[in-house]
């Protein structure tokens, strides 16, 4: 069988510190060797082209370069920060909300994000679900018709083969209660060659006007939006697939209103809807990336009014222990007796009264 360009690219990822060190002498000074025992290293050839190796603080490099600081586990950091295991009625399925579930289709990713919230499972690439586990997942979904949406997650589901993806979609579509399928993937960012004509046609064959497929990707910095990424998004968008973005607020990468403004606007330009900006989950060894929530709120407040509403995501916090996601934000409104005092996006305090039914005669 001939090997496709994206598979070839996967085989040519940087996977050792020696290879990375040849490109970037600074790597040795960050003493990252031990960090690899917790999480493997992988950087795709596409990402390598975007890194500015003259800058040791390059944001794209920081997201994928192992550092000794990953060994510092801080108070409050957890192996399973989102409580996946507590909410798994069958292995590899996470059912936290009534109407939607996560299906962990693989723990493999094209690239290793050093801030990954699921790094205790993706870091060593836990085995993919076996046939029996897939059966159990499908049986659970069939037995719970309140579940309307299956979210293929991982790991990165689009690192699976075309045949495996087709199999998942085919079997999920056979369950009448599953109306929406969502695919959470980062290949649009780090392996855009994966979005092949054949993959797009597989997706198209498994959707119709009332059974959509949504793709949610993960851009964190405007410089990640290169020509190849734009082309990958365009293939999906032209096929009628809505692409959204969930990013993560990361220290030294995108913790400024200017960087996020550029990111969100560029995403809107290429037909990606900015959807969530996540507060970094409390995964072990990620503290060097963490931005205080107060700072996050301040940044989002700066962006309100400055960035077009169609490009402004919600800032979200995922509560530990599987307790769910909540929007975090500046409290714009305060009730004072009969009226509300509301802060406008331009800092003005405005009084607002709700209408009342006419009580006359
Ligand atoms: C984040 C998450 C979802 C999706 O939540 P949305 O708010 O719909 O994006 C679903 N299930 C689990 C377990 C999750 O962690």
Image (tube, grey):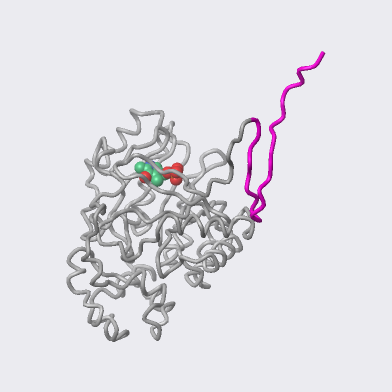
* Image quadrant occupied by the C terminus: top right
Farthest right residue? 361
Residue 9: x percent and y percent? 35, 72
Residue 7: x percent and y percent? 34, 68
From the viewer's perspective, tell me whether residue 209 is left or right of residue 92.
right
Hey, which quadrant is residue 333 in on the image?
top right
Farthest top residue? 361
Residue 258: x percent and y percent? 55, 68
* Image quadrant occupied by the N terminus: bottom left
Farthest front residue? 337
From the viewer's perspective, tell me whether residue 141 is left or right of residue 136.
right
Please give the range of residues in magenta.
Answer: 338-361
The secondary structure making up most of the magenta span is: loop
Q: Nearer the viewer, residue 219 or 110?
A: 219
Residue located at (36% from left, 61% from top): 290
Residue 122: x percent and y percent? 26, 57
- The answer to whether residue 170 is visible is no
Residue 227 against residue 169 in the figure, above or below: below
Residue 22 against residue 30 in the figure, above or below: below
Q: Nearer the viewer, residue 59 or 101?
A: 59
Q: Nearer the viewer, residue 213 or 327?
A: 327
- The answer to whether residue 133 is visible is yes
Q: Is residue 147 magenta?
A: no
Quadrant containing ligand 1? top left
Hey, which quadrant is residue 188 in on the image?
bottom left
């Amino acid at each position: 069988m001939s090997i496709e360009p994206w598979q070839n690219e996967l085989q040519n990822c940087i996977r050792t510190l020696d290879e990375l060190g040849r490109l970037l002498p600074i790597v040795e000074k960050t003493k990252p060797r031990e960090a690899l025992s917790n999480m493997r290293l992988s950087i795709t050839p596409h990402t390598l082209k975007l890194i500015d190796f003259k800058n040791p603080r390059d944001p794209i490099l920081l997201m994928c370069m192992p550092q000794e600081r990953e060994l510092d586990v801080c108070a409050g950091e957890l192996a399973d920060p989102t409580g996946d295991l507590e909410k798994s009625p069958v292995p590899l399925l996470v059912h936290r909300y009534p109407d939607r579930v996560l299906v962990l289709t693989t723990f493999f990713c094209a690239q290793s994000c050093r801030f990954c919230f699921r790094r205790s499972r993706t870091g060593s690439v836990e085995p993919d679900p076996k046939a029996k586990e897939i059966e159990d997942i499908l049986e659970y979904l069939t037995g719970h018709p309140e579940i309307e949406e299956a979210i293929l997650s991982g790991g990165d589901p689009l690192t699976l083969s075309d045949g495996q993806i087709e199999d998942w979609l085919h079997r999920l579509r056979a369950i009448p209660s599953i109306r929406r399928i969502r695919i959470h993937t980062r290949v649009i960012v780090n392996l855009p060659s994966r979005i092949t004509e054949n993959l797009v046609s597989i997706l198209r064959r498994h959707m119709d006007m009332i059974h959509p497929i949504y793709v949610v990707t993960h851009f964190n910095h405007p410089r990640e939006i290169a020509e190849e990424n734009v082309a990958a998004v365009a293939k999906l968008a032209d096929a009628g697939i809505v692409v959204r973005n969930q990013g993560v607020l990361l220290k030294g990468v995108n913790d400024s209103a200017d960087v996020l403004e550029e990111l969100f606007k560029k995403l809107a330009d290429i037909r990606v809807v900015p959807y969530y900006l996540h507060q970094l989950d409390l995964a072990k060894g990620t503290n060097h990336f963490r931005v205080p929530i107060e700072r996050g709120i301040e940044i989002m407040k700066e962006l309100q009014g400055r960035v077009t509403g169609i490009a402004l995501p919600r800032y979200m916090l995922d509560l530990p222990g599987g307790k769910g996601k909540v929007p975090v934000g500046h409290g714009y409104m305060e009730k004072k007796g009969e009226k509300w005092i509301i802060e406008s996006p331009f800092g003005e305090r405005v009084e607002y009264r709700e209408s009342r039914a006419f009580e006359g005669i």
